Image (cartoon, rainbow, N blue to C red):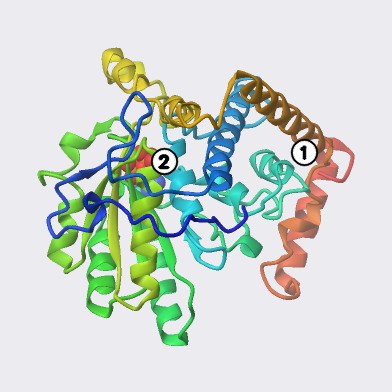
């Protein structure tokens, strides 16, 4: 996405300052779509529309990918319905050279940084168009050109990676800031404590962004921690934090922008807790009706981040039904074309089993591959696999 443009003069509202306790909840948008007085970050029209477009694209992509999984066209998918504002708002507030270390629900960030939709879908399939050649689990995109790091599936390890990269940026004197994402569940990992401590001590240029979606698979946030909030944990590491309404794209944008500017100035890391909700299952393999109350889901539906922002744009006369219909059609066409292109790609070549392990496959790898070929030939009478 293009660098966000901002109108000059307007200053962010007082509520946005990072607090020591992290107890306040920063929000800009009321449920009716109006903005809290003094809290509107005053973004330019193009930026506002781009935020909305990305939220809608993210939602449609997510919906279609889950459908592909249900139709058996991809193996696995981790939906993000309800969390669009958290990813889109935070990524839009970063500069293009900043690095993103995603956790489980930030795939849209790769798209915003330029990963073509068809390549993202190829990653879900694991075919020859996939730059990881099917070696990563679905939804574990990677896009180096867009400074989007490949996600590690082991919960909490993304934190150490992000902190390490931030330390490297500091040593090298880069201008880049590191955005390290995690979920509420990841705050119980050893890596969280080690990473937060290191980041605080060395004052690395980092924004830790926790998407508190209230659940870690079937474990509710209330059983995850005895702390009053997640944001408050940062205090122990000497790090300012903010608790932000994660379903409010303007609040997320504003908080991330401020935290990134702070890091870029050399003033060290900030921790953001984005309060949001995972409306669907943990993944396509999960059935949340087994462990949570449908009433809770319905309550969060009313705070839908896309509807809320649409109301804000409509109130500003920047959006209407005709524009909505045109955007929906464009995105549907875009996703359809991307699915077609990704599904047209063939499987990965069998040799990719042994390439990229070393610069040149070793003799042992070649031998093993020959054995695989032999077994396959015996069993099927043909090769390739
Ligand atoms: C070390 C480790 N333990 C367990 C798992 C299995 N696991 C995958 S996702 C997940 C829950 C993560 O919850 P959270 O951090 O809140 O992220 P969310 O899925 O809600 O986005 C677990 C336990 C794992 N991947 N790694
Ligand atoms: Mg969670």
Helix, strand, or loop for circle 1? helix
**Which residue is at 54% across, 56% downward?**
5
Residue at screen point 54% across, 47% down? 47
82, above or below 135, in the image: above
Residue carrying label 2? 249
Residue at 28 percent across and 44 percent down: it is 185
Residue at image mark 1: 342
Task: Name the quadrant of the C terminus.
Answer: top right
In what element is the residue under mark 2?
helix
Frontmost residue, 155 versus 177: 177
Residue 210 in picture, x, y percent from top left: 32, 49
The image position of residue 168, as x and y in percent, is 44, 80
- Is 151 or 232 nearer to us in this picture? 232
Of circles 1 and 2, which is in front?
A: 2
* Numbered tag placed on residue 364 in the rendering: none
Q: In the image, 222: left or right of 110?
A: left
Asked if the residue at tag 2 contacts the one at tag 1, i.e. Cβ–Cβ closer than 8 Å, the answer is: no
* Residue ranking furthest to the front: 9
Residue toward you, 325 or 181: 325
Residue 256: x and y in percent read 38, 55
Residue 30 seen from this side = yes
Q: Is residue 179 left or right of residue 96?
A: left
The numbered mark, 1 or 2, whose residue comes first in the sequence reads 2
**Relative to the observer, which residue lies in front, 120 or 349?**
120
Residue 361 quadrant: bottom right
Ligand 1 resides in the quarter of the picture at top left
Residue 16 point in image, percent of width and height: 26, 52
Q: Is residue 155 visible?
A: no
């Amino acid at each position: 996405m293009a660098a966000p443009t901002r109108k000059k003069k307007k200053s962010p509202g007082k509520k946005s300052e990072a607090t020591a306790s992290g107890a306040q909840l920063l929000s800009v948008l009321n449920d009716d779509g109006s903005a809290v007085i003094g809290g509107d970050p005053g973004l330019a029209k193009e930026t506002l529309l781009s935020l909305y477009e990305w939220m809608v694209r993210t939602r449609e992509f997510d919906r279609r990918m889950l459908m592909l999984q249900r139709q058996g066209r991809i193996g696995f998918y981790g939906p993000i319905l309800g969390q669009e504002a958290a990813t889109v708002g935070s990524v839009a507030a970063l500069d293009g050279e900043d690095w993103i270390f995603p956790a489980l629900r930030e795939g849209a960030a790769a798209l915003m940084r330029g990963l073509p939709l068809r390549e993202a879908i190829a990653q879900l399939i694991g075919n020859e168009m996939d730059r990881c050649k099917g070696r990563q689990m679905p939804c574990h995109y990677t896009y180096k050109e867009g400074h989007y790091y490949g996600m590690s599936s082991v919960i909490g390890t993304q934190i150490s990676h992000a902190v390490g990269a931030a330390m490297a940026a500091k040593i090298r004197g880069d201008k880049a800031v590191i955005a390290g994402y995690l979920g509420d569940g990841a705050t119980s990992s050893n890596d969280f404590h080690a990473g937060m401590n290191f980041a605080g001590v060395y004052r690395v240029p980092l924004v830790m962004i926790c998407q508190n979606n209230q659940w870690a698979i079937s474990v509710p946030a209330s059983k995850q921690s005895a702390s009053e909030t997640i944001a408050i944990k940062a205090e122990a590491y000497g790090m300012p934090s903010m608790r932000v309404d994660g379903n409010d794209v303007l609040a997320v944008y504003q908080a991330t922008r401020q935290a990134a500017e702070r890091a870029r100035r050399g003033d060290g890391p900030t921790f953001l807790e984005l309060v949001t909700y995972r409306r669907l299952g943990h993944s396509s393999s999960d059935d949340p009706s087994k462990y949570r109350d449908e009433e809770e889901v319905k309550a969060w539906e009313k705070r839908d981040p896309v509807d809320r922002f649409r109301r804000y744009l409509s109130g500003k006369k920047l959006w209407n039904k005709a524009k909505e219909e045109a955007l929906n059609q464009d995105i549907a066409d875009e996703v359809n074309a991307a699915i077609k292109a990704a599904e047209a790609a063939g499987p990965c070549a069998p040799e990719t089993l042994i390439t990229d392990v070393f610069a040149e496959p070793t003799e042992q790898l070649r031998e093993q591959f020959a054995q695989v070929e032999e077994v396959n030939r015996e069993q099927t009478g043909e090769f390739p696999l």
